[in-house]
Amino acid sequence: MNEADAKHIAKPEHGVGASLRRKEDARFLTGRGQFVGDIRLPGMLDVAFVRSPVAHGKLGAIVKPDGLHDKVFTMDDLVGVKPIRVLSSLPGFKPSDQWPLARGKVRQVGETIAMCIAPTRAQAEDIAAMVEVEIDDLPAVVDMLAARSATPPALVHDDWGDNLFLQTDTKADLSAIKASAPIVVRRHIRTARQSMAPMEGRGVVCQWDSRLDQLVMHSSAQMPHINRAGLSECLGIDQGRIRVISPDVGGGFGYKGILLPEEICLAWLAMHLKRPVRWIEDRREQLTANTNCREHDYDITLYAQNDGKLLAIDCDATVDSGAYSSYPFSACLEAAQVGSILPGPYKMDAYACRTWSVATNKPPILPYRGVARTGVCFALEIMVDAVARAAGMEPHEVRLANLVQPDDMPFDNITGKHFDSGDYPQALRCALAALDLPKWRARQKTAEADGKRIGIGHAIYCEQGAHGTSVYHGWGIPMVPGHEACAARLTPDGILELKIGAHSHGQGMETTLAQVANTVLGIDEAQVRLVHGDTGMSPYSTGTWGSRSAVMSGGAVATACKAVAERVRHIAAVLLKVPAESLRFEAGSVVDPASGNRRSLAEVAHAWYRQPQLMPKTIDGAGLEVTVGYKAQRDTGTFSYAAHACAIAVDTELGTVELLDYVICEDGGTLLNPMVVDGQILGGLAQGIGTALYEEMPYDDEGQPLASTLADYLLPGATEVPMARLEHMETPSPYTEFGQKGLGEGGAIAPPAAIVNAINDALAPLGVEMMECPVSPRRLRAALRAAGVHEREGA
Amino acid sequence: MKPAAFDYVRPESLADAVALLSRSDGGAKVCGGSQSLGPMLNLRLAQVHSLVDLSRLDEMRRFDLRDDVLRIGGAVTHARLEDGDYPDVTRGLLPAVAANIAYRAVRNRGTLGGSLAHADPAADWVSTMCLLDAAIVLVGPKGERRVRATAFFVGPFTTVFEIDEVVAAVEIPRFSSTARWAYRKVCRKPGEFADAIGAVWVDPAHGVARALMGSLDSMPFVVEGVDALAALRQPGGLARMLDDAGVTEPYEREVHAAMLRRALADVERPFDTSG
């Protein structure tokens, strides 16, 4: 089929591939969603935490205010509660003990020390302000390279002997390449620590159900079943006595893939007080106290031939993991992932990488959208452009010379990653054609009226998603994915209820999974209800993370619907008096193609539940309710990929960057809902622009966070995000139900690399390179100043 | 964060407000749109015994056009100035500045008087009023007094008004038909506080020539006179002004010089009254 023909094929209106409007948006757009902050329970108390004002110190006496001793709780009150302790089977990994309320030491600003209860949050904060805490300051460990040096300023965890959660080494020998490579490019590259900033912060409402002898926790969480397991471990009560409900969640991006100290505290409070308690994270807590992400440091060298062919990568990669190892991902996920994915979508002869997961006196980091890929793509793609400059080539020529080719697919790369399918060079060519590279190169040669410098940049990556046991078992962390379940039930009136253990925090799963059901059963999406986010009502799941839900929950829903279809067919065969095998599903009915006779799903369900006398004695009693599991054919994951290309203008006088055009060519395999996919890509792009140009959580030498409001922590908004142009390729994954690939994180991966490559392209004539993001005006001006670029008098 | 408890009072008149403030011994604080004070109360950076809300006093939301000045009530919002609800005597300067203050949601509530009383050196009205050397009208128990903007601001977040005085109005000088102005600022994002402001006002008919650097660590720095402005266009002129203004950090020198240089260039261009 040629392209012109393809465009004339009608787009489906239902099922997989339809750009169906999201079912959940009606309630979101009219204020009828229900988030944790909307929950009101009779007698509910609000909780405010006393948090550490210092980054590192020995904890002394905690003095409760007179007359309020029963309103204030410290770790000493939480008898029997265990610290959060994440174990990993990776050799050399050191676990940390994170007490829900500090014990012995505080290791970060904002660490929870005591909790205070009152009828309102304001009153609870009044009490918190009266609690006196004695802390003997210790030197703060703030910089990751100092932290891992032979003479660190202090030990974050006294009994470790160093500040390393984990160290890894590929132990590859590059000596032959080092001795002979004609092009050697070495750079020091950094990405800033960021604060993840979902619109809805965290929130917990907890109560004790005395009838069920059960703790019921509402939490804004991505993986309620994992929170349940973690709560059970820390509280010492069995999982059956814990129910975690995650209602509507206003964005997660990894920030809500964690067992919170606050969750353990509130669970204990609800059990102790036998009345409902609530904590709603405010923006100040989110920015200054709670988990961060993304802080990487690379000392990286690329070896290449004169024709741009890559020979080897050699890298020391360090990740600032913060004070504690968060549950369930641990402090080592980020750096170890750097080590395994740094070669990107390229072929090379040799690869050496050493990684350090370093403990510092800052909040723990969590895997944020893209996890280590955003930092890795930034480091690698900046380096590829530097190689291109060294070789005197266009950057895309270097990429095309090194990308894994479509004929190579499936391809096992140098770290053993199994790329499932795709045409990486075509994605790059597509993006550059859409951008019109020659047009921008021509414009670049002419002077701009406003004196700005034009730059063109691009970047390419592949994103492993929905990877399972074979990838994760080696980590030995509390959460190893393997399979995904779905419970499906046709109600007596023909409504399809789907229950899954993953949870939507904005992905539109109520719509996309209904589309999957439509493709299998022919049922209208409006007749499908998704039940999720409740451990009491859904099958076990490791939750929504790692771009896995479209593949894994999509696969589980398809499998369950096929099982229901089989049952429906047998019942309908009785009603229509034809063999079951001959029946087809069509628009909510079961049809006998020979006679044209049909029974709707509602009629079949009605017969089964309400008129069992119609069924022969021999019929299987299993009925219209199934719970089934799904495993992908291969669990090494899908590899979606994309090329991003942009044109920018740099004001060298002010150090500002303007995005003039931005193009993305993405291949997510078969798209369950192209409109939802576009939304995912554009949302990720906004976050990627934040990483590239705006977002930074700075700390001073004492470990004090310097951005405590959104006036200091700059998020991209409508005026910072251009209307990007999206191009799609669809190379189905050979290993998934419909050929779909996980792609939820991709949009956030490439923008820092593409944008900073464009900046470096603009600044190349001045001999200036930016190697750290975000490229703030101060950082850009400092680099220009260091290169002696004072374009004007005055400064 | 939630604010500590406070009393909220909405007086019926400016006189009542002044009387309340006089009786409170400094425990009461005036609020306008609360776009700065509100967050400070929430973060508990500010705590007050009572808030005296002037934002709905009709007598402070009026304007009075006289021969040489436009008097604007202190409770007039940025949005109303942006929308041109008041006669413009500044050839578009006030609406243009108003339109770029923070975000519309802030402009709908934030007030001219509140911004001046708060005296954030990065605030647009602080620079604008210093550029125009507008008269700030203060009303207290002893009646009304006028203070020139350049004398009104003592330093960052510090002004000359007494605890029982209210910024009741501002008197804006009427521009001649040949007056020219330029107002440049650079922000990390549109709507954020400026990192640097450069502004110029020349009105030969009234013998006015003023240039300003704003959003400094200190209050806006103004030079005046035709010769002074000409000197700024000479090599080293802006550097000398930066030295005089006490700006030493390299990046800040660069952006403040750039903003004023661009503003000086703007007033030379054909004038666009749309701002």
Image (cartoon, coloured by chain):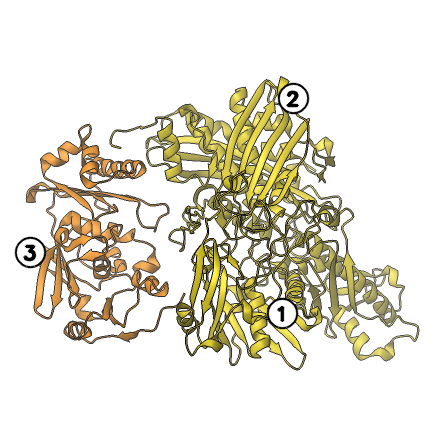
Chain colours: A yellow, B orange
Residue A694 higher or lower than A545, as above or below: above
Residues marked 3 and 1, same chain: no
Quadrant assignment, res A351: top right
Q: Pointer 3: what residue?
A: B67
Q: CA distance from mark 2 to mark 1?
A: 57 Å
> In what element is the residue under mark 2?
helix
Residue pointed to by mark 2: A177
* Disc with the residue nearer the chain's start (2 vs 1): 1
Q: Chain of mark 2?
A: A
Circle 1 packing at 10 Å, graded few (<14), some (14-19), many (20+), is: few
Name the foreground residue: A268 vs A543.
Answer: A268
In the foreground, B227 or A514: B227
Distance, label 3 to label 1, CA atoms, is 79 Å
- From what the image shows, is residue A604 above or below residue A87? below
The answer to whether A331 appears left or right of A106 in the picture is right
Q: Nearer the viewer, mark 2 or mark 3?
A: 2
Q: Give the foreground label among 2 and 1.
A: 1
Left or right of A395? Residue A536 is right
The answer, for residue A728, to whether it is visible in the render is no
Q: Amino acid at mark 2?
A: Ile
* Residue type, mark 3 in image: Asp
Q: Depth check: give the residue in front, B216 or B262.
A: B216
Label 3, residues with CA under 10 Å away: few <14, some 14-19, many ≥20: few
